[in-house]
């Protein structure tokens, strides 16, 4: 069965989603809600090729994978190692100084009400970061917060070209294309 892709139509103010990012995939007969259209989203129906289940499995296969490992868990502090998928690192520049600085700013300059307040990044490797936090938190909570903050940088290997999104907007926010056209409109961050 053909499928629809819900695509972000404009950058979100919080920077967590950027224009061209794919949000979800559904069967072509799926009715998205009223908020899942312009001005925030465009709907791209792919009329041939893979089933929506195969397309969703494909997207899920290149989402970032994080592994949070507890290195040291004490009553007054905890130390975690955050490992990131190496393929996505090379695409997103996790090893680059700009992203390292963003992580330092977010974690080490956290406000007093943040779970990261008082935390120190102990170091980086090519595919991981080690951080010590002064007050233990549930690992899942830390992981979710980290993923929310850095998902745009780390979480999307493919996205739609800006020109393709603009074309969909000009067509009223809902378009039908072939699988070949969809592939032609995708950008792979690993090749940028």
Image (tube, rainbow, N blue to C red):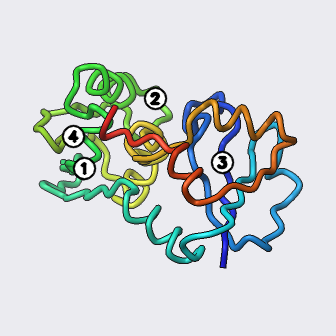
Q: In the image, 42: left or right of 158? A: right
Residue 82 seen in this snapshot: no
Which of the two marks, 4 or 2, is nearer to us in this view? 4
**Residue ID for mark 1:** 84
Q: Are marks 3 and 1 in contact (CB under 8 Å)?
A: no
Which of the two marks, 1 or 4, is nearer to us in this view? 1
Instruction: Say which mark, if any, is on residue 112.
Output: 2
- Residue at figure coordinates x 46%, y 71% from the top left: 57
Q: In the image, 74: left or right of 13? A: left
- Number of numbered markers: 4
Of the two numbered discs 4 and 2 on the same chain, state the one appearing first in sequence: 2
Vertically, is 20 above or below 64? above
Disc 1/disc 2 C-alpha distance (Å): 27 Å
Vertically, is 153 above or below 82? above
SS class of the residue under badge 3?
A: strand
Q: Who is closer to the viewer here, 54 or 113?
A: 54
Q: Who is closer to the viewer here, 150 or 26?
A: 26
What is the x, y in percent for residue 104? 29, 25
Instruction: Say which mark, if any, is on residue 131.
Output: 4
Which of the two marks, 3 or 1, is nearer to us in this view? 3
**Residue ID for mark 3:** 7
SS class of the residue under badge 4?
A: strand
- Residue at figure coordinates x 84%, y 50% from the top left: 35
SS class of the residue under badge 2?
A: loop
- Residue at figure coordinates x 87%, y 42% from the top left: 172
Mark 4: give few (<14), some (14-19) or many (20+) Cα within 10 Å. Answer: many
Disc 4/disc 2 C-alpha distance (Å): 17 Å
Image quarter where the N terminus lies is bottom right
């Amino acid at each position: 069965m053909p499928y629809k892709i819900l695509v972000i139509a404009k950058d979100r103010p919080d920077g967590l989603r950027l224009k061209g990012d794919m949000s979800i995939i559904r069967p072509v007969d799926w009715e998205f809600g009223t908020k899942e259209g312009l001005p925030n989203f465009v709907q791209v129906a792919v009329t041939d090729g893979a089933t929506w289940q195969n397309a969703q499995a494909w997207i899920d296969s290149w989402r970032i994978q994080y592994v949070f490992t507890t290195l040291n868990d004490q009553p007054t502090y905890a130390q975690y190692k955050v490992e990131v998928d190496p393929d996505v690192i090379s695409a997103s520049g996790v090893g680059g100084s700009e992203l390292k600085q963003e992580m330092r700013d977010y974690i080490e300059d956290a406000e007093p009400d943040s779970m990261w307040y008082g935390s120190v990044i102990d170091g980086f490797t090519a595919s991981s970061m080690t951080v010590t936090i002064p007050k233990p938190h549930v690992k899942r909570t830390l992981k979710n917060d980290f993923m929310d903050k850095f998902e745009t940088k780390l979480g999307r290997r493919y996205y739609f070209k800006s020109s393709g999104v603009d074309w969909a907007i000009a067509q009223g926010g809902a378009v039908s294309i072939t699988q070949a056209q969809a592939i032609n409109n995708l950008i792979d961050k690993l090749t940028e």
